[in-house]
Image (cartoon, rainbow, N blue to C red):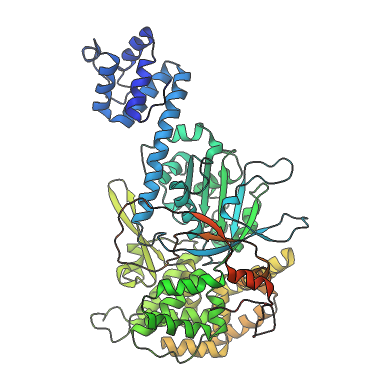
Amino acid sequence: MALAGNPREALLWALCDLEENNFKIFKFHLRDRTLLTGQGLARGELEGLSRVDLASRLILMYGAQDAVKVVLKVLKVMNLLELVDKLSGICLNDYREIYREYVRCLEERQEEGVNHRYNQLLLVAKPSPGSPTLEQELKVEDLFAPREGPDQGPPTVVIQGSAGTGKTTLARKMVLDWATGTLYPGRFDYVFYVSCREVVLLPESTLDQLLIWCCGDNKAPVAEIRRQQPERLLFILDGYDELQRSFAERLKRPGPTPIEDMLHRLIRREVLPTSSLLITTRPLALRNLEALLKQPLHVHILGFSDNERKKYFRSYFTDEEQIKNATDIVQGSDVLSKACQIPGICWVVCSWLKGQMERGGVLSESPSNSTDIFMAYVSTFLPPNDNEGCSELTRRMVLRGLCSLAAEGIQHQRFLFEEDELRKHNLDGPSLAAFLSSIDYQEGLNIKKFYSFRHISFQEFFHAMSYLVKEDQGQLGEESLREVNRLLDEKQQAGSEEMTLSMQFLLDISKKESSSNFELKFCFKISPLIRQDLKNFKELMNSIKHNRTWDLEFSLYDSKIKNLVRSVQMSDVEFRVGHSNESNSCSRKSFSVHTSLSNRQKEEQKRPIVDKRNGAGTQKGF
């Protein structure tokens, strides 16, 4: 059998492979309107048709792809399963190329897509329990390499990192590199990207519906994809932490939601047990995730290398004077230099600095922590009170609206909001591009627009601020106390635990200098009641040994940077959280994943690295 190159050839080959008697039976079944969903052929239309004529007639009626599905349906009724398998294999090979092209075009159309600059990400593999080896840097190409040890089942890789470390960008880059043939060539027939934030939009909580959603095609051959070599499928579940429901929601409705249950069955290997999995998550969700996993490979994502922070600045700022000014500001601040290791915060810093430069602003003081960085960004891009045409969109109203929207989302573990929900909080999505991004979702014949905060860290920040800007100026409420109790409980069970990012922001604001800075920047007076609550909250939190967000990335980076042997170079990738007005064409471009070690990194391995702040070993930024 010569391999058919497209559905038309495959259909003709299948008909020609039928013996004469089977060909007559095949034409008999084509008259069955119930089998062919009301589009059966009349007897007079079939008489005298040769195999070539019938193939042409079916293609004319259904189109090449759907005509093949009709033939497959009839062949299954005739129990010609060997022919069904051969035809399915041919069609799947063809559909694989259709899907690859869909992935390439989808990424090119993304306003914030992965495009043609590159930044390095540091990935460090966590050793298995009891292993004598220390953390070692890992290449993306080796994530699914065979591992040592008995009874190694299908690979499961968990990439963990705090908010903004580049997990989503890495996941999308991997899918794109597979689609262009530069990553895992010959290993996977399909690589499916599943956003745990957006998967809640699925109309049905079934695996078939998930595959249709991933393919962007209601007529995708999902049954054949599942049945044909499932070991050649890779699912990338991005943002597992965003799938988790809040504590209050779990009390109201014990057990997983249908969407959670479907994904949990995939993770537990109850469906497609031989497929490969890659899951990205923030550390807070690891405990729940671990209970579902079997022999996973844990990988930490540490963010930018020192050199990549410099390259990112040069790619973000197009004006040489702006590059020099921004570099000098960051180089002169240990806090900013360290923070820019995290890609998401690096974008916040760059956007804030550029916004200040374009407005002719003067930086009176340098941020003292990550919370100050977010406060500086928000105060820069909130609509000013005297902005013409913005009478209804005052600074205070917008701030309160963003805070109440964020708090409602965090409390109900929701990250996507419809336009009606924004209006309820007195927000206009298109005018708030500095804080909100939008996606269009097709629901039947209609297109619905959903909004989300530009990054989860923004939603957490506004959630923290929501305690301070309530109109009733009441107390902080039970949420902060619940967080303290969670940390106390988990400390007893598992040692030091990471606080939520919202609580970290709130703890920073509770410091006298930060609360004064908050009042000055946003013209809000913190009530005495809230000040007392902040003081009590601060005392409780200081009594608990907890980790701050990004502490793990910074400590691993500091301890391992001297010993790195290789670096993961994600070619042609730009970490962009911001918005762009550029239009992209759906053109094929070359992407690749390389391994490199610069001369500068080799020199750094030979010399000690000193942190001037506290004497600890660290990388000096910029």
Q: Is residue 354 left or right of residue 463?
A: left
Examine the rendering and report whether any part of residue 566 can be seen: yes
Residue at image location 35% in from the left, 12% down from the top: 23
Q: Position of residue 294 (x, y in %)?
A: 66, 46
Instruction: Using the rendered view, name the quadrant where residue 162 is placed.
Output: bottom right
Front residue of 26/404: it is 26
Q: Is residue 463 visible?
A: no
Q: Quadrant of the N terminus?
A: top left
User: Residue at the location (71% across, 68% down)?
Assistant: 491
Task: Give the vertical position of 37 relative to 470 (above or below).
Answer: above
Residue at 45 percent across and 29 percent down: it is 89
Give left or right: position of 605 versus 312.
Answer: right
In the image, is residue 524 above or below residue 105? below
Task: Tell me: residue 434, above or below residue 518.
Answer: above
Q: Residue at x 41, y 73 (%)?
A: 316
Q: Hey, which residue is sitting farthest top in the picture?
A: 21
Q: Position of residue 253 (x, y in %)?
A: 54, 54
Q: Residue furthest left?
A: 44
Quarter of the image where one finds residue 39 = top left
Q: Nearer the viewer, residue 355 or 418?
A: 355
Indicate the position of residue 133 as horizontal and vertical percent values: 75, 58
Count of numbered circles in the view: 0
Q: Residue lying at the far bottom in this picture: please name it.
A: 364
